[in-house]
Amino acid sequence: MAKDPVRVLVTGAAGQIGYALVPMIARGIMLGADQPVILHMLDIPPAAEALNGVKMELIDAAFPLLKGIVATTDVAEACKDVNIAVMVGGFPRKEGMERKDVMSKNVSIYKAQASALEANAAKDVKVLVVANPANTNALILKEFAPSIPEKNISCLTRLDHNRALGQIAERLDIPVSSVKNVIIWGNHSSSQYPDVYHAVIDGDKPVREAVADDAWLDGEFIKTVQQRGAAIIKARKLSSALSAASSACDHIRDWVLGTPEGTWVSMGVYSDGSYNVPAGLIYSFPVTCSKGVWSIVQDLPINEFSRKKLDATAEELVEEKQLAYTCINE
Ligand code: NAD
Ligand code: LMR
């Protein structure tokens, strides 16, 4: 029997990530090849015409799984009954800016959209915040949508996770599918810590053993992953879009359909004090997912090198949280 359609909201749908993401959702890449979807697309009035153009292209692409399209500039209408909300709307970082430089513009959007989601979305809506500063926007969304369970609000660090897999695969000249269990700890910012102490290739060979170059792993590798967003902006004069859209699909797919046995992924989720990360932040952890619920992978040994890096990125998130509240109260 055919499944009922799932309603998926994409905010900022007329933007560059939106343009890459909506066809992936309509093709079943996010929720599966047998899962019909109804796309809800939100943008702001200056982008209404472009949004309508995206809607026209979705119609023209004749996606068999796409059972309906809501394209609107009305946030309440966009959020109505949605089961999944991918929050991309906001202002992207330009060359020379840090992600927190887009804070004041974006946190106020997330405060307002929290209320719209709370009032209109399905009660069990799953939320993924992509727009930067992604962790802090997600935290603001959580704080201003108190009736949405905190387990249902997350931010995207899967792009960083995939970038780390990609760098290891390039270095070893192996397919990226052979590498697993890297971890992104902390903030989706240049303070994030891409950790390969528990990563393996080909099922069980430690990445550290395979790479056999600690200086590279502890130096250039970490820096490359931390700075990859800036490198893309420098090269494209635009921030990453196809990789962000694809990683957003990976994030939701694994959350809803489950992570493969023996594999974890990185998600920005509400911290509960695990790994001595302060509670009350949206912080990226290694997680496994089953039946639509994520759980932080517990009891991984953390050495002194890693500990410092976990703490540094937590400190930045504490500062961002304070700054976000200052922006909101101004
Ligand atoms: P973009 O400028 O191309 O698109 C953003 C869209 O959001 C625009 O169409 C804009 O009109 C719309 N928008 C602005 N305010 C809005 C609001 N209040 N409600 C709804 N829509 C609104 O930008 P982009 O390249 O698609 O990037 C979007 C965001 O994603 C940026 O903040 C960017 O920094 C972030 N990003 C995050 C990651 C990640 O891994 N977390 C990766 C790439 C980009
Ligand atoms: C990325 O990581 O590519 C995005 O967060 C865009 C940015 O500002 O770096």
Image (spheres, rainbow, N blue to C red):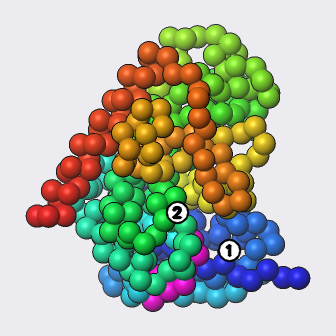
Whole-percent x and y of residue 307?
42, 23
Q: What residue is disc 2 on? A: 152
| Residue at x-position 71% and y-position 39% | 263
Residue 310 seen in the current view: yes
Judge left or right: residue 2 versus residue 149: right
Binning the other alpha carbons within 10 Å of mark 2 as few (below 14), some (14 to 19) or many (20 upward) gives some
Q: Quick check: which quadrant has ligand 1?
A: bottom left
The residue carrying mark 2 has its beta carbon less than 8 Å from ligand 1 = no
Q: Nearer the viewer, residue 25 or 284?
A: 284
At label 2, the amino acid type is Asn
| Residue at x-position 44% and y-position 46% | 271
Of label 1 and label 2, which has the lower sequence position?
1
Q: Secondary structure at mark 1?
A: helix
Q: Nearer the viewer, mark 1 or mark 2?
A: 2
Question: Magenta residues?
Answer: 77-84
> Is residue 80 a member of the stretch shown in magenta?
yes
Judge left or right: residue 112 versus residue 74: left
The residue carrying mark 1 has its beta carbon less than 8 Å from ligand 1 = no
Binning the other alpha carbons within 10 Å of mark 1 as few (below 14), some (14 to 19) or many (20 upward) gives many
Spatial distance from mark 1 to mark 2, Cα to Cα?
22 Å
Q: What residue is disc 1 on? A: 26
At label 1, the amino acid type is Ala
Q: Nearer the viewer, residue 46 or 140?
A: 140
